[in-house]
Amino acid sequence: MALNKVEICGVNTSRLPVLTNEEKEKLFIRIRQGDENARELFIKGNLRLVLSVIKRFSASNENVDDLFQIGCIGLIKSIDNFNTELGVRFSTYAVPMIIGEIRRFLRDNNSIRVSRSLRDTAYKAIYARENLTRKNQKEPSITEIAAEVGIAREDIIYALDAIQNPMSLYEPVYTDGGDTLYVMDQIKDKKNKEEVWLEHLSLSDAIKKLNSREREIITLRFFEGKTQMEVASLIGISQAQVSRLEKNALRIMRAYLT
């Protein structure tokens, strides 16, 4: 893999901007207000992060342009999902997301070889889907995506299906001080197995064993179906803290009930 290329996917890597922490904070404020220009500036200002990640895959025989495009998808997902109130640096959150995106691509690409043109169509569709979702505040249909990129609907479906790779619920999102947050922690599930388990046991006595903060988290998570991110925002602590408190609360309740 030729990582010494100056131009990757039409981007001159020798001229990529570098953002200061202050600039990043200001841009994020504008991004949250819907400023598309700020979002583009933030993406460009973090492309060096993608470059540093793909160097980890130097032993791969994959085309560096492909890895860069996949890494950019991971970067964009990181920007769209990052919460500045988590108390972690953006790079701490983004790097595992970018790595995970590339690893999923490599796993999929090793099992089924997908043509370059097909992958390019899929990349365009993914970018269009994310842009339309952000613009219209809802998931676009395949027909809308096809119209956006000017490619036949059937070709879009085929391309997306070709690169499809299921994500594990235990895929790490990021690690903060040894507490790893997984995809499953980001998912709102109003009827998951934990809740079923809780509903069929003597909850009242078990919940009394928890402190007020733990009781609040258990209620929000398993009775109101909130995500850890939503709980963190509601009670004013980081998602990593919510994760720790939730795990401890469930451990205490299980210990009491078994």
Image (tube, rainbow, N blue to C red):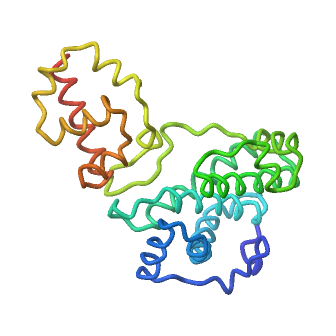
**Image height of 43 relative to 79, above or below:** below
Question: From the viewer's perspective, is residue 217 above or below residue 3?
Answer: above
Residue 206, position as x, y percentages in the image:
15, 23
**Residue 147: where, in percent of width, then height?**
82, 51
Q: Residue furthest front?
A: 136
Q: Determine which quarter of the picture holds residue 46.
A: bottom right
Query: 98 and 122: which one is in front?
Result: 122
For residue 252, above or below residue 213? above
Residue 163 x/y as whole percent:
75, 44
**Where is residue 32 shown, x and y percent of the image?**
47, 65
Report the front residue among 248 and 187: 187
Q: Residue furthest bottom?
A: 15
Q: Quadrant of the C terminus?
A: top left
- The residue located at (64%, 58%) in the rendering is 73
Q: Which image quadrant is residue 44 in?
A: bottom right
Left or right: 13 as drawn, with respect to 153:
left
The residue that appears at 59% across and 65% down in the rendered structure is 53
In this view, the residue in front, 1 or 19, is: 19
Residue 26 shown left or right of residue 205 in the figure:
right
Q: Which residue is drawn at 13% across and 33% down?
A: 210
Q: How many labels does the image show?
A: 0
